[in-house]
Amino acid sequence: MKNRVFSGARPTGRQHLGNYLGAIQNYVNLQDEYDCIYCIVDIHALTTLDDTSSLQKNIHEMMLDWLAAGLDPRKSILFVQSHVPEVTELHTLLSMVTPLSWLLRVPTFKEKVKLQPQNVNYGLVGYPVLMTADIVLYKAGVVPVGEDQLPHLELAREIARRFNNLFGDTFPEPEAKLTTFPLILGLDGKEKMSKQLDNDIELALSDEETAARVMEAVTDPARRYRSDPGHPKICNIFRLHGYFNPFQSDNLAEQCRSAEIGCVDCKKALAQEINSTLKSFRERRAKLAEKPEYIVNVLADGASRARVIARETIKEVKQNMRLL
Ligand code: SF4
């Protein structure tokens, strides 16, 4: 039997290049090696959302992107967190074995308190417990994480271990599959690419929209005139060329340094490469978008397969806790 991978992502709607290069490609690659469960964590989103009016649309758009990018419902279980209510049951049960002090010291909780002082809700502090429930409900042995997420996974392991110590061996302690998620900067060249910061390039844009977006990007600020030599190392357009046009990188760097190429042409070339890389993705997406019922069916089927595993786990958890 293949080892099981679990990963969840918040419903952020249409995905952008940062999501694609950072997470989605990794999800797709893991499908052949592992038994993968990928979840859109809509309940987690509620801890920071004041307004849920876009939530359903965002879930739909995100799943469209995942499927068009190659996530395959025949290989992986794809579903929405709230469609498997057992996760909230397990969250409650795990919250009884999780010391509050463990949760209050989580750095991201402290950050969120600063970011949204008007909405320090109960769910915010319990977030790591729900995240643990997400993973152990499916007895996932492997969780793909970046280095910055290691402390969260360590907490999940501690919660699982504490439960096992109190009630007997129930959950595997999930192992981190340390993944180098490239940090993709946004069009401002400073912050991580993000929809909220409006510095992103959505995968589903048309060729023309992509080109227009690339043209907005900040380049080397020292290059004020076409004849000024450029510094590719500090230019985000050059970094993006590295992902979409890797074989031309050295050549391009030289052309930039000698001012043989101007930023406009360099951006046009990048837009072309992005568009050609995403051509088949966009074609698949357009076809999928014509069949909204297909997405509904994929999610329903994913939830029903996930629930089979979830019900078994909940039964075992309750038995071990002597709740039956
Ligand atoms: Fe950046 Fe390209 Fe302009 Fe050089 S030519 S500064 S790499 S956009």
Image (cartoon, rainbow, N blue to C red):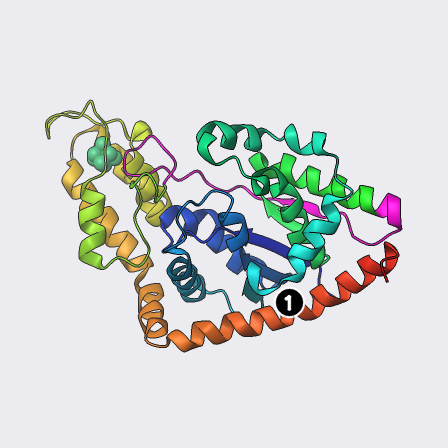
Above or below for 44 versus 218: below
The image shows residue 13 at horizontal and vertical percentages of 38, 55
- The answer to whether residue 97 of the structure is visible from this angle is yes
Q: Which residue is mark 1?
A: 306
Could you tell whether 211 is left or right of 143 in the image? left
Frontmost residue, 317 versus 39: 317
Residue farthest to the top?
Answer: 222
Residue at position x 50%, y 42% from top?
Answer: 181
Q: Ligand 1 quadrant?
A: top left
42 inside magenta stretch: no
Q: Label 1: how many residues lie within 10 Å, few (<14), some (14-19) or many (20+)? A: many
177 inside magenta stretch: yes
Residue at position x 74%, y 47% from top?
Answer: 94
Q: Amino acid at mark 1?
A: Ala
- The answer to whether residue 255 of the structure is visible from this angle is no
Frontmost residue, 265 versus 153: 153
Q: Main secondary structure of the magenta part?
A: loop
The image shows residue 6 at horizontal and vertical percentages of 63, 55
Could you tell whether 241 is left or right of 45 in the image? left
Residue at position x 69%, y 38% from top?
Answer: 155
Residue at position x 31%, y 27% from top?
Answer: 234
The image shows residue 251 at horizontal and vertical percentages of 28, 39
Frontmost residue, 75 versus 307: 307
* Quadrant (top left, top right, bottom left, bottom right) of the N terminus: bottom right
* Magenta segment boundaries in residue numbering: 164-193
Answer with the quarter of the image where residue 107 lies.
top right
The image shows residue 83 at horizontal and vertical percentages of 57, 65
- SS state under label 1: helix
Frontmost residue, 119 versus 162: 119
* Quadrant (top left, top right, bottom left, bottom right) of the C terminus: bottom right
